[in-house]
Image (spheres, rainbow, N blue to C red):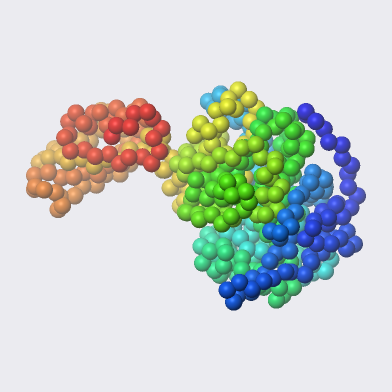
Amino acid sequence: MSQAVKTETPKEPNVVAAKANGGTAVNGKLEAQKRPRHVSGGVEEIIDPFCNPEKPQRISFHDVTSAAFLIRGGVERTPCPKSTSSDLYGMELYLKKDFLQYTGSFKERGARYALLSLTEEQKRTGVISASLGNHAQALCYHGWKLNIPVTVVMPKAAPIMKIQKCRNYKARVIVDGNDMGEAKSLAMRMSREEGLLYVNGYDHPHIMAGQGTIGLEILEQVPEPDAVVVPVGGGGLIAGIATAVKALSPKTKIIGVESEKCASFTRAMENDGPIHTPIKNTLADGLAVPKVGYNAYATAMPLIDRMVVVKEEWIAVAILRLVEEEKCVVEGAGGAGLAAILAGHLDELKGKKVVVLLCGGNIDTTVFGRCLERGLAAVGRLVKFNVEVSDRPGGINDLCALLVRVGVSIKDIMHERAWLRDVYTVEVKVVCETVDWTHSLQLKNELKKFYSKVQFSDVPLALSNDTDS
């Protein structure tokens, strides 16, 4: 490695972690200070003492090593093999497969460390958090394993599958709130009323330190990488990884990736601080955080070399590529890093050693199917068109014969008559599968030769210079 940082195995790792400004060390544990609160618009707002915007807390390399010491044996040490498609991407590409954790995401690292760092009294009382899914599952699972009561508040939009998994881990699950903001407000209110410690899923210092253990593993598995590509949501993941990687390998570039529909960290950089960012429905729902964490931003900002924003379609293509080439099923957030490479945003890394983090694999089965179809359409392997053909005997048969001659596979076909200008034609709607973009262009050219009224549905992402439809 380019620069080794000498460390000693901490005898009492919780003492190190307890130096966070939002709490005080008591018997080697982190005690929350009295929760500050203020009144805004007549409604009392409770401020998380560990995520105070006035006093952001930066984690250190020692915090990460303390986390690694405590959680070892309790979470999976996930593999980081070389991609089977490295030559295709033009770089020495490695994939850190943290979606192989028991609950399907990297969130287990921070969740376990946060729970192990509680005082004995806090362990008896329990913790509470708000989450759409991955953090909730990780906290519930490790709370169950460690016999610590866990309450999670999940918004109504949370996937039913994730809600049920949390219940399977014997946690108290409350489904309330139209969005994460409302769910978090309820959780903070309950934390005050019931004396529960609120654990922020991406901005709590222990959470960030736990996620940073990924960085330690990466450097052990792939020494001195030229770059580590990390998906970014609330910022806790990249904050932890950057802290670990930059301490041991300062020349390694840390590159963050966001979806264009939830680029809250990029907007925070433009604003010189966290700011509320409107988000839209995205394939990378795990990254859909409207405002990055104050601690995460303060920690990560000086260490990040570059932030990249990718289009949704590239994320779909990345999910497709990982299934077909790497035999990996990941969620949208997990595919964001590879999406940046596929989109050509990281061409300066060609010929270099690059690690991409596959952070999660909890994708709904119906969404997964849509992602695959969207990815196929984006690369020109799924084509949709409407064509008017003669309504006389053999009209549709001639169309099908043309498709067979071109060598495409019909996925769906239907026709309608009632809304056409005359009674002698029928409109046929076809979805078919091609080999690649060149094959789809061949199909378009053949159809235009024989039919004057043919209309193609433009794919949302043009992966070819030929945009003629």
Q: Is residue 144 visible?
A: no
In the rendered image, residue 296, in percent from the top left (x then y), is placed at 68, 51
**Residue depicted at x 78% and y 35%:** 248
**Residue depicted at x 52% and y 45%:** 259
Q: Compared with residue 158, is residue 363 higher up or lower down, i.e. above or below?
A: above
**Residue depicted at x 67% and y 44%:** 301
Q: Is residue 383 visible?
A: yes
Q: Which residue is at the front of the view, 171 or 12?
A: 12
Q: Which residue is at the front of the view, 15 or 308?
A: 308
For the image, the number of numbered tags is 0
Quarter assignment of residue 375 = top left
In the rendered image, residue 468, in percent from the top left (x then y), is placed at 29, 32
Q: Quadrant of the C terminus?
A: top left
In the rendered image, residue 57, in percent from the top left (x then y), is placed at 75, 54
**Residue depicted at x 61% and y 30%:** 93
Q: Which residue is at the front of the view, 100 or 449?
A: 449
Q: Compared with residue 113, is residue 316 higher up or lower down, i.e. above or below?
A: above
In the rendered image, residue 456, in percent from the top left (x then y), is placed at 27, 39
Q: Compared with residue 419, is residue 77 higher up or lower down, i.e. above or below?
A: above
Q: Quadrant of the N terminus?
A: top right
In the displayed structure image, the side of residue 400 where residue 271 appears, left or right = right
Quarter assignment of residue 407 = top left
